[in-house]
């Protein structure tokens, strides 16, 4: 249930969700345990062209670079430095989906920036979208991405290669980008400013620090005084099976792994280059009211505070919305004494919509991906009535199929109407609609939970039989 998932996300803070693995516990890093600070002249309270606000951005991913572009294009007296851990940007990573809310966000930053992204985009929002049965090659449900965007005069959803997007975002900001300068921890200056300690031991001073350094954020670790990768046992072990035989390659392995799946799946595997096939673990980190997003003049952005499952394609989109709100909050300041309140305002504006989006992403992952099955199907073969997948999951999936398109329509309305992160009655109405549809899904699963044995006794079997 989306709202329930969102509520759980808001009331509890869990480490990244993934399969259990043991790793050495990283030393605890505290914001107050930073190395001795270099001398720095106290900054005046008033923000002006002669004493501009200086923002340190830890991380040169989509969110960090988007914030850098916002600040670069602002007329406010603000300067910035992007501190990126890697020594060089390599063409690594697959495509990133930029939904209509993200493309509208880029357009609001700068029309020229939007056009550069548009030129590299593969448009998907003006085509048929949906969820397909991977066994029968039939549609679970189709949904309309075009109409919600057109009715709001927003760009269509598209896909862009992540390295190309980063390259575009660096065009204006490269003079303020430092590579090989990952933030390890930070401390507080006597005038209230921050000093970031880099992986090299160097210290960099600023008025504000924004942690956009990903799910294993060192800035978050320092802020919360917890290991970047979460609590662990401090023990690690591994084992290897040695063999003189050479592996057949990933393609034959995958063809075997997906045996019994639809021909379309195998077509995709056959035309994909082996070096482009990767196994990637998925993690999420529910946003929380119990753990800080901001502390003093430090705040977190993107995956550092709300990594989410990829089922809605909203991870990068929400990081962009974070950047827009942080930029609005900081560029409106007239004095440094207002910084903490501005960062708290960022959290207040983003917490509720992010909890809902993160909950929807988890809902899509847990229910649609894990809970759904090949829909039950009745038909005739050789003059006999034949039942396919007439079991609990198959019947529930079949019953819920007509509801899915409506659910997706409500979901897109929530995402597209909320990109400016300004509360409205319409947003509340849409949120209640999502709650109603989520309740319907939950009731449908619960009501049929006791019927599995009955359904199986009617002749149901494994999917496709």
Image (spheres, grey):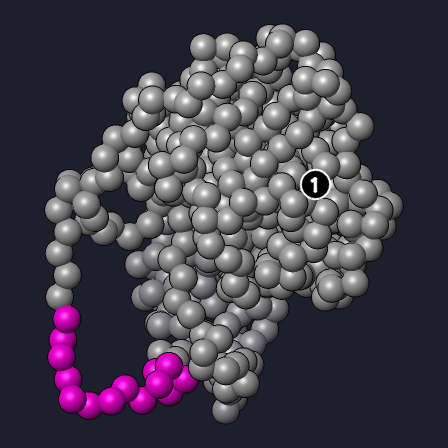
The residue at the point 59 percent across, 28 percent down is: 55
Tell me if I can see residue 301 in this picture. no
The residue at the point 56 percent across, 40 percent down is: 82
Q: Position of residue 94 (x, y in %)?
A: 54, 64
Badge 1 marks a residue whose secondary structure is: helix
- Highlighted range, magenta: 240-253
With respect to residue 41, does 219 lie above or below?
below
Q: Is residue 151 left or right of residue 98?
A: right
Q: Position of residue 397 (x, y in %)?
A: 50, 58
User: In front here: 23 or 427?
Assistant: 23
Quarter of the image holding residue 17?
Answer: top left
The residue at the point 59 percent across, 73 percent down is: 138
Quarter of the image holding residue 198?
Answer: top left
User: In front here: 22 or 168?
Assistant: 168
Quarter of the image holding residue 387?
Answer: bottom left
Tell me if I can see residue 173 in this picture. yes
Estimate how packed mark 1 is, as few (under 14), some (14 to 19) or many (20 or more) residues with alpha carbons within 10 Å.
Answer: many
Quadrant of the frame with the C terminus: bottom left
- In magenta segment, residue 152: no
User: In front here: 219 or 436?
Assistant: 219
Q: Which residue is mark 1?
A: 69
Q: Position of residue 464 (x, y in %)?
A: 43, 77
Q: Position of residue 117 (x, y in %)?
A: 74, 56
The residue at the point 13 percent across, 66 percent down is: 239
Give the main secondary structure, helix, strand or loop, of the magenta stretch: loop
- The mark total stands at 1
Q: Is residue 7 left or right of residue 110?
A: left
């Amino acid at each position: 249930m989306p709202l329930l998932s969102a509520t759980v996300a808001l009331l509890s803070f869990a480490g990244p969700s993934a399969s259990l693995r043991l790793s050495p516990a990283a030393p605890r890093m505290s914001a107050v345990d930073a190395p001795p600070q270099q001398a720095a002249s106290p900054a005046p309270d008033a923000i002006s062209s002669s004493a501009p606000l200086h923002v340190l951005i830890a991380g040169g991913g989509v969110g960090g670079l988007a914030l850098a572009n916002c600040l670069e294009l602002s007329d406010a007296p603000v300067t910035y430095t992007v501190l990126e851990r890697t020594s060089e940007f390599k063409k690594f990573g697959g495509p990133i989906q930029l939904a209509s809310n993200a493309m509208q966000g880029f357009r609001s930053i700068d029309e020229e920036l939007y056009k550069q992204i548009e030129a590299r985009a593969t448009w998907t929002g003006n085509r048929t979208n949906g969820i397909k049965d991977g066994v029968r090659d039939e549609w679970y449900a189709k949904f309309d991405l075009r109409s919600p965007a057109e009715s709001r005069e927003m760009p269509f959803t598209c896909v862009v290669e992540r390295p190309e997007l980063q390259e575009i975002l660096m065009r204006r900001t490269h003079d303020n980008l430092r590579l090989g300068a990952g933030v390890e921890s930070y401390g507080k200056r006597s005038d209230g400013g921050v000093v970031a300690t880099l992986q090299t031991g160097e210290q960099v001073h600023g008025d504000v620090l924004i942690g956009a350094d990903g799910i294993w954020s060192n800035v978050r670790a320092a802020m919360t005084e917890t290991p970047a990768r979460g609590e662990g046992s401090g023990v690690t072990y591994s084992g290897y099976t040695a063999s003189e035989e050479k592996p057949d390659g990933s393609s034959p392995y995958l063809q075997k792994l997906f045996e019994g799946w639809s021909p379309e799946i195998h077509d995709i595997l056959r035309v994909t280059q082996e070096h482009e096939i990767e196994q990637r673990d998925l993690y999420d980190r529910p946003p929380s009211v119990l753990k800080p997003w901001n502390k003093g003049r430090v705040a977190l952005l993107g995956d550092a505070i709300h990594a989410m499952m990829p089922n809605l394609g909203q991870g990068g989109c929400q990081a962009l919305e974070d950047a827009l709100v942080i930029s609005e909050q900081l560029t409106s300041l007239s004095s440094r004494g207002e910084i903490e309140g501005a960062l708290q305002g960022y959290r207040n504006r983003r917490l509720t919509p992010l909890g809902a989006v993160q909950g929807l992403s988890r809902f899509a992952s847990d229910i649609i991906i894990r809970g759904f099955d090949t829909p039950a199907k009745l038909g005739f073969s050789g003059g006999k009535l034949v039942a396919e997948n007439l079991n609990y999951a198959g019947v529930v999936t079949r019953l819920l199929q007509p509801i899915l398109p409506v659910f997706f329509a409500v979901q897109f309305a929530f995402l597209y109407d909320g990109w400016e992160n300004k509360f409205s009655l319409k947003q509340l109405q849409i949120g209640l609609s999502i709650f109603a549809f989520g309740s319907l899904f939950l009731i449908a699963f619960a009501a049929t939970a006791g019927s599995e044995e009955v359904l199986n006794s009617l002749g149901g079997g494994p999917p496709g039989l």
